Image (spheres, grey):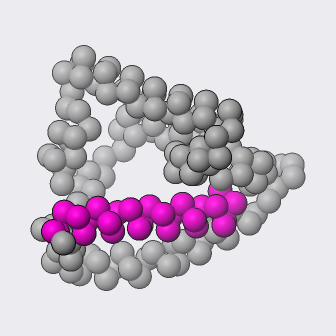
Amino acid sequence: MTAAVRQQLVALGSGLLFAVGLGIAGMTNPHKVLNFLDVFGDWDPSLALVMLAAILVYAPVYQSQKRQGAPKLADRFHWPTSRDVDVKLVAGAVLFGVGWGLSGFCPGPGIVAATLGTAPVLVFVGAMILGMLLYQKVTRARGGPSSNQSAARDG
C-alpha cells in the first residue's frame, strides 16, 4: 500500500470518527445547538461539556505532536503560521457565528446531517458551498491567492 493511499485511508477514518462523534454529541441536531446558544432562554449547557471534553482530549495530543519532527504519513506538519487578527478574520468569525445562530449548524455537523437528506440541511450545505465558491471567485477577481495557493505558502 502506497503512502498516498495510507494518507487517504487515515483521512477517511478520521472523518468518519469525527462524524460519529458529532452525531453522538448532538451537534447535528440544530435544536440542541440553538438551545446551547440561547443563554437567556431554554439554555442547554451540554454542548459546553462536549467542547470541554474535546479540548481535554486534544490538548495533550497537540502538545506531543508539536514535539515530533514530522507526522508518520507525511513529510511535515502544516501548522498555522499567521497570528494576525485582521478584518477578514473578524468578518469570517462574525459570519460563522451568525450562520450558526440562525441555522443551528456549523460546517462539519451540517455536512454530517446532510446525509439524512432533509431539506433544511441540504439548503444549508448548498448555501455554504455557494458561499465558498463565491469567496473563491471574488478573491481571484481581486488578484488574491486562492486557498490552495495560500495553504501552500503558509504550510
Is 9 covered by the magenta stretch?
A: yes
Question: Image quarter for residue 88?
Answer: top left
Q: Nearer the viewer, residue 140 or 66?
A: 140
Please provide the residue range marked out in magenta. 2-27
Residue 67 in percent (x, y) is at 23, 81
Residue 13 in percent (x, y) is at 41, 67
Q: Nearer the viewer, residue 81 or 31?
A: 31
Residue 131 in percent (x, y) is at 45, 27
Q: Is residue 119 left or right of residue 134?
A: right
Residue 24 vertical position relative to residue 65 in the rendered view, above or below: above
Residue 20 vertical position relative to residue 132 in the rendered view, above or below: below
Residue 37 visible? The answer is no
Q: Main secondary structure of the magenta part?
A: helix
At 82% across and 55% down in the image, what residue appears? 43
Total marks in image: 0
At 65% across and 53% down in the image, what residue appears? 28
Which of the image's four quarters has the C terminus? bottom left
